[in-house]
Image (cartoon, rainbow, N blue to C red):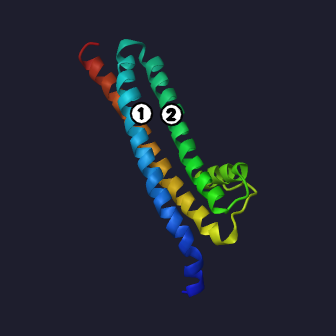
Amino acid sequence: MDDGLITAWYPSWLWSLPLIVLTVVIHVVGLSLINEKVVRPLSGIAQRRQFTAGFVIIMAVVAWLVTLLHAIEGFVWAFAYERLGALPNTTAAVLYSFSAMTAYGHANIVLEQHWQLMGALEALNGLMLFGLTTAFMFAVIERVWRLRRRSRTSGG
């Protein structure tokens, strides 16, 4: 492998790996808080009220909160891009970050050449974060449905 390539990519790895760890930690803490402060208290709605309405309320609140969580993480990357000089301003940095994180990739914005690997690493980070979100939302659905089945079998 070309030593110049490794040298050129070193800063992207140096900055991206801590950002990946930071955003995964933010995500896990955020999902834990959503579970503790929202999902558990709202799970009773599915038992006390009409199940469908309660389920919709729970999933709507969870979807809104995890979207905010992803936005926070996108802003973390955008802040890094701007501070590193990889992008010229906050607007471009935020648009690029959200585009990279979601793998949408249609923003007509390109990182400075020596930071381009960082964009690919953010996309990798986005896959991890969205995977965690998907697993969490699936677990919420399972939990609510399990509560519903339990309340039906116990005569509720």
Residue at 64% x, 67% y: name it. Answer: 116
In contact (CB < 8 Å): disc 2 and disc 1: yes
Q: In the image, residue 118 lies at what x, y percent?
A: 58, 64
Residue type (three-letter) at the residue carrying disc 2: Leu
- Of the image marks 2 and 1, the number of the one nearer the N terminus: 1
Cα–Cα gap, marks 2 and 1: 7 Å
Q: Which of 154 and 42 is in front in this view?
A: 42
Closest to the observer, 18 or 116 = 18
Q: Farthest residue in the front direction? A: 83
Quadrant of the snapshot with the C terminus: top left
Q: Position of residue 134 (x, y in %)?
A: 46, 43
* Circle 1 residues within 10 Å: few <14, some 14–19, many ≥20: some
Query: On the image, which quarter does residue 68 sit in?
Result: top right
- Report if residue 15 is visible in the image: yes
**What residue appears at the point 43 percent right and 39 percent down from the top-left corner?**
30
Please identify the residue farthest to the left as the structure is shown.
154
Name the residue beneath numbered marker 2. 65
Please provide percent x and percent y for residue 138: 41, 39
Res 2 visible: no
What is the x, y in percent for residue 86?
67, 63
Q: In this view, does 2 lie above or below 106?
A: below
The correct choice, above or below, for 71 with respect to 14 in the image is above
Task: Specify the quadrant that holds the N terminus.
Answer: bottom right
> Residue 115: which quarter of the image?
bottom right
**Residue behind mark 1:** 34
| On screen, residue 48 above or below 19 | above
Q: Report the residue at 56% width, 71% height from top.
A: 11
Q: Which residue is drawn at 62% across and 55% down?
A: 100
Residue 64 is tagged as none
Q: As drawn, is 134 to the left or to the right of 118? A: left
